[in-house]
Amino acid sequence: MKVLVTTPSFIETPGKHQELLRAQNFDCKLVKGPLSSKVLLENYDEHDAILCGDDHFDQNFIEVAAARGLKIISKYGVGLDKIDLDSCKKNNVSVRNCVGVNQNAVAEHVFALLLSYNRRIFEIVSSTRNGDWVRKTGLELDQKKFGILGFGKIGQRVSGLAKAFGMTVLACDPYASDEVFLSQGVAPATLGELVRNCDYLSLHAPLNSETKGLVNGRLLKKANPNLVLINTARGSLVDEAELYEALVGKKIAAYLTDVMEVEPMIKNHALSKLDNVLITGHVASRTLENVQRQGLMAVENLLDEIKRRGL
């Protein structure tokens, strides 16, 4: 069995996930992504399976690779927006992902960003490193309103943490049942209501044709000017150019993000120059514990699919 492995977290972090893969005695080729379809094709050598991260699997790659033996794509992670699923189905390429695996790590990162911003941690640490003793005034989370767009596993975990901080939680998700909202003790709301009424809005929706650019200038014109927007989902949920104008024009207070429309981030990106923006490099799910959980699940999904297909 020939396996191409492209996810950097899996490759760079030692642990049980690597041990499990090595124990299979597969012929593995390691190439750190995220890779474009063109670069994927350059590195594809009649592999039976690919254990991937956020690489781009377009129609051309799927068709060419399937004709040369590709049978399985095992996604290290959850989002499948960069994989042409229709082409996979037409070409009999199985696709598996790690549903639910990121909820704790990502939810904690939401509050790592939020607390760092609210308590002005980066400014204060920078000043003390320079030998100064500047005492900045921060903000508390208690009694604030916290909005969530997308109320799946991660959104629900974020809700639990927000409540632990004493916040009132509202959520928008047209695909979540009334029972889900009731079970979590969360009030359903429209996206417009979230941006108007909440102090914080955290994005946890999948990226698809319905959600791409959903947070745009038109929506942000309706926003509470003190709104802090948090994005640990996908960069393209937000129209970055229109977001920039909203931040500069003080339509909203801040943007805290772990994801960008183009990754790695474009050098000298306009958002990176703003004081009311915090950007981390797509590391929300990258904890030692979660790399192993996610890696093990990705390998186990691969093994299950091999067994299912009798390979």
Image (cartoon, helix red, strand yellow):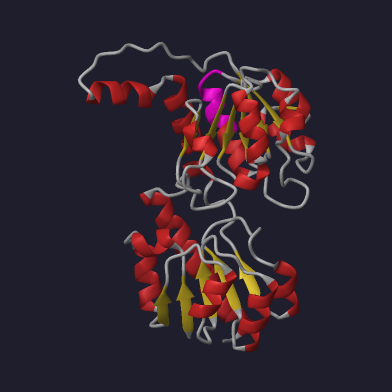
Q: For this view, does 162 lie left or right of residue 292?
A: right
Question: As displayed, is residue 142 above or below residue 188?
Answer: above
The verdict on residue 18 being magenta is no
Question: What residue lies at 60% left-to-right and 88% top-to-bottom?
Answer: 68
The magenta span reads 159-166
Q: For this view, does 251 lie left or right of residue 301?
A: right
Question: As displayed, is residue 13 above or below residue 3?
Answer: above
Characterize the magenta stretch by its predominant secondary structure.
helix
Q: Position of residue 294 (x, y in %)?
A: 47, 57
Q: Residue at the left extreme?
A: 131
Q: Position of residue 78 (x, y in %)?
A: 58, 56
Closer-to-camera residue (39/108): 39
Q: How many marks?
A: 0
Question: What residue lies at 48% left-to-right and 69% top-to-bottom?
Answer: 299
Question: As displayed, is residue 295 above or below residue 37?
Answer: above
Query: In the picture, residue 153 is in which quadrant?
Result: top right
Residue 181 seen in render: yes
Residue 189 seen in render: no
Question: What residue lies at 72% left-to-right and 35% top-to-bottom?
Answer: 216
Q: Position of residue 179 (x, y in %)?
A: 76, 36
Query: In the picture, residue 238 is in which quadrant?
Result: top right
The verdict on residue 162 being magenta is yes
Question: What residue lies at 37% left-to-right and 27% top-to-bottom?
Answer: 122
Q: Position of residue 16 (x, y in %)?
A: 35, 63
Q: For this view, does 129 lie left or right of residue 157?
A: left
Of the 4 image quadrants, the one containing the C terminus is: bottom right
